[in-house]
Image (cartoon, rainbow, N blue to C red):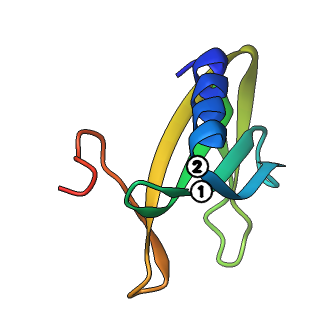
C-alpha cells in the first residue's frame, strides 16, 4: 500500500459514502501513525485503518533475573523505510464491536 493509493481510496470513500469520523493519531509508545476513516458503506458501518510504522532495524532486551526487576526492549528504527498496512473493519451491532475483514473475504458473502 502506497501513500498515493491510500489517498485515492480515501477520495473514493468521501465521494461515494457518508463520512462518520476521520482522524489521524500518533502512537504513544512507538513511532508511527494511524489514520482512521469511518463511513456508511455498502454493507453498513465500516472503518479503514491506514497504519504507517518505521522498519525495526534492531532490538535489544535489557533486564535481570532478580524478582521484581524491570525488563525493557530497546528498538532502533529506520529513518527512511516504512511499513504501511491497511485494515478494514465492519461494525457488528449485535456485539457493539468492530470485526476485522480478512483479506480475500467477500463483502456481504
Q: Do the residues labelled 1 and 2 touch (CB within 8 Å)?
A: yes
Name the residue located 53 percent from the left edge and 34 percent from the top edge. 85
Name the residue located 45 percent from the left edge and 57 percent from the top edge. 89
SS at circle 2:
loop
SS at circle 1:
strand
Viewport quadrant of the C terminus: bottom left
Name the residue located 24 percent from the left edge and 57 percent from the top edge. 108
Q: Residue 33: give x, y in percent of width and height.
A: 75, 41
Residue annotated with mark 2? 17
Task: Determine if residue 57 is in view.
Answer: no
Q: Please say if 52 is above or below 37.
A: above
Residue annotated with mark 1? 39
Q: Residue 38: give x, y in percent of width and height.
A: 62, 57
- Depth check: 75 or 70 in front? 75
Gap between marks 1 and 2 measured at Cα:
6 Å
Q: Residue 13: give x, y in percent of width and height.
A: 59, 40
Q: Residue 102: give x, y in percent of width and height.
A: 30, 49
Q: Which residue lies furthest to the left in this view?
A: 109
Amino acid at each position: 500500500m502506497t501513500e498515493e493509493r491510500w489517498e485515492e481510496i480515501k477520495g473514493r470513500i468521501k465521494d461515494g459514502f457518508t463520512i462518520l469520523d476521520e482522524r489521524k493519531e500518533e502512537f504513544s509508545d512507538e513511532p508511527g501513525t494511524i489514520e482512521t476513516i469511518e463511513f456508511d458503506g455498502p454493507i453498513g458501518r465500516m472503518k479503514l485503518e491506514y497504519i504507517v510504522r518505521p522498519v525495526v532495524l534492531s532490538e535489544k532486551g535489557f533486564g535481570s533475573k532478580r524478582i521484581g526487576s524491570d525488563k525493557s526492549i530497546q528498538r532502533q528504527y529506520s529513518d527512511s523505510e516504512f511499513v504501511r498496512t491497511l485494515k478494514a473493519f465492519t461494525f457488528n451491532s449485535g456485539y457493539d464491536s468492530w470485526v476485522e475483514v480478512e483479506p480475500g473475504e467477500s463483502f456481504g458473502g
